[in-house]
Amino acid sequence: MSENSNLESLVNEWNNIKCSFVRYTSAQTALNFALITAQTKDVSAGLEDAIKNVPFFAVTNLIYAKGVDYITKSSGKYGRLNANLFSLTVTGLFYTYALLTNDSDPTLPSMIAGSIGIYLTNKQVTEIKSD
C-alpha cells in the first residue's frame, strides 16, 4: 500500500513539472549550443558542448522546475512574484559562478539566459495557476 502511494505521488509530481522541465532543458541546451557556436565559430564545438552538458542541464532544470512549482503553490497570491525572484536569484548565482570561473565576460549570456528563464518561469506559473 505504501509503495503504491509513493509511486502515485512521484508520478503526480512528474506530471506537474514534466512540460516545464522539457522546456527549460531544451531552451538551455539550445542557448548553450548557440553561444558556444557563436563564440568559437565552430558548429561541431557547439554541438559537442551542448550534448556534453545535457545531463547537468537536466538535473538543474528538474530541481528548478520543482522549485518553481513548490514556490508558486506555497506562496498564494504572491506565487508569481516569488517564482520570479527565485528565477532572478538562480540567474544571479550562475552569473556569479561564471564570473569567478570563466575567462570571458558572462554578462550577455546571463542576460539572455535570465530573460528566457523569466519567460519560461512565468509560463510555468500561468500553467500552475490555471490548474
Image: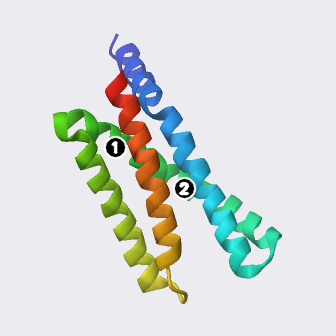
Mark 2: amino acid: Phe
> Observer-nearest residue: 17 or 116?
116
> Observer-nearest residue: 105 or 97?
105
Mark 1: amino acid: Val
Pick out the residue farthest to the top. 1
Coordinates of residue 125 in the picture (x, y in percent): 36, 37
State the separation of the CA atoms marked 2 and 1. Answer: 16 Å
- Residue 75 visible, this angle: no
Question: What residue is shown with label 1?
Answer: 68
Q: Which secondary structure, mark 1?
A: helix
**Residue at left offset 50%, top offset 63%:** 113
Image quadrant for the N terminus?
top left
Tell me: residue 63, above or below residue 15.
below
The dot on residue 34 is: none
The dot on residue 57 is: 2
Tell me: residue 50, above or below residue 9.
below
Q: Which secondary structure, mark 2?
A: helix
Pick out the residue farthest to the bottom. 103
- Residue 19 visible, this angle: yes
